[in-house]
Amino acid sequence: MKKFYLSAAVLFLCVTAGAKDSEDALEFYQAQSRLLSENKRQDQAYAAALADALSVWQKRFPQDKQNKDALLLQADLFVRAQDYPSALAALLKSHYLFPVPNDSALLSSRVEAVMNELDKDQKGQALKLLAANVDALNKEQRQDAYLRALYSIDTPDMYAVTAQEIDEFLAQNPGYAQNDKIEILYGDLHRRNHNPMAAAAQYKKVGALYPKTGYKAASTRMAADVYADDLKDPQTATAMYNQVLKNYPDSVEIGVVYKHLGIMEENNKNYENALAYYDKAIQMLEGKPAAYDAMMGKADVYAKMKDYQSAYNTLVQTADSFNENEEKYVSTMLKAAEVADRRLKDRSQKSVTLEKILLAYPQTRHAPEIMFELGYCYEKQGKNVQAAAMYKKLILAYPTDTFAEKAQPRLDRLNK
């Protein structure tokens, strides 16, 4: 095992100033990386310092053909230093900024090993990113794609390194046409990582510092969302939402603003105002994902007002409006069935609702539960033949399911 001393660290940190070219400097780092220490903490610190020095090399020689080799070496050093977020960033950067044939085969084993230490649940997403084809993109577009790839790894450990990479990109590429979108992405990153003040400032920055941006309304609305939801400051949020309504009346954001104003009024128990805002949102959003939230909010308000029939009707209408989305349709109709049962005390209405779900999506993952509830509804209505038939169908279709086990004794009793 080779040993090294602080003088070696000082040497490699300074060498680039006198290196005659990039190749000599990189060869120096490669040689230094082979030095090991028996002291684990010292070895980790040495690896981290070497990796940081390679960042300087990359900035001095950004177009050098050996950049990929430098990034792979840097990633290995970060792993040695147990800085796995920085290791993943180096590996993704090597793919997006310096792609080569068979890149995925070259990088996947490294990425997989890093994700085992970083976040196993995000491993699939990280490996998927290596399949992205960036050959047709220019330099700035590749850097943009790289930042979005980093952002898509949804784990708190990546927050700091992603923020650092975005900062460096914005500083080095002030003229990039899509910088307003990058700034919004930065705001999203802050918000996702529970830094709402930074998120709000970032969104407001877009409208203030990018006079030609097409996202002034969106960025103002997003800042208002932060004040409403994260900072619990309804006064500031309302003022900003009204600013969008006043200054950008033709914006696609208007419907979303009405939805959020509806939420705020609902939270303040101003239910009539909430219904009015939700109705405006539903009208303007017309089938968009945000319209679903507004319709569900409207149903929730009716339930809070104890107008359960209107709540039920709104839920069914919502499900019908989004019937091509299985998860939305099924979950919404299940809520409608619950309202029919617990609030309206109408098992006939509940059974009709459950029947519609099975007719629309007979293979839904909720099918065993729905079939059992439907059999139970029939049974309580005195429709024993229908109840027995439904229990039998459930047992035959899902013999090992918990609901099938619950159905068997009920079927046995009905068959006596």
Image (tube, helix red, strand yellow):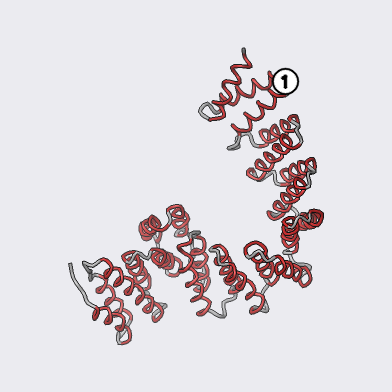
Quarter of the rendering containing residue 10: bottom left
User: Taking 393 as reference, is 269 above or below it?
Assistant: below
Q: Nearer the viewer, residue 352 or 303?
A: 303
**Is 283 on the left or on the right of 35, as rendered?**
right
Q: Which residue is drawn at 42% across and 78% down?
A: 62
Q: Which residue is drawn at 53% across and 30% down?
A: 401
In the displayed structure, 144 sits above or below 369; it is below
In percent of width and height, residue 406 lies at 57, 26
200 is higher (above) or lower (below) than 384: below
Q: The N terminus lies in which quarter of the figure?
A: bottom left
Q: Residue 264 location in percent, x, y? A: 72, 59
Taking depth in this image into account, of 13 and 191 the one nearest to the observer is 191
Query: Residue at left 74%, top 41%?
Result: 316
Q: How crowded is mark 1: few (under 14 residues within 10 Å), some or many (20 or more)?
A: few
| Residue for badge 1 | 382
**Farthest-out residue, front:** 269
Q: Position of residue 307 (x, y in %)?
A: 80, 43
Q: Quadrant of the C terminus?
A: top right
Across and down, in percent, residue 24 comes to 28, 80
* Residue furthest to the left: 1
Total residue callouts: 1
Dot 1: element: loop
Residue type at the position of mark 1: Gly
Q: Residue furthest bottom?
A: 18
User: Outermost residue toward the top?
Assistant: 416
- Res 314 quadrant in image: top right
Q: Nearer the viewer, residue 130 or 133?
A: 130
The residue depicted at 60 percent of the width and 33 percent of the height is 369
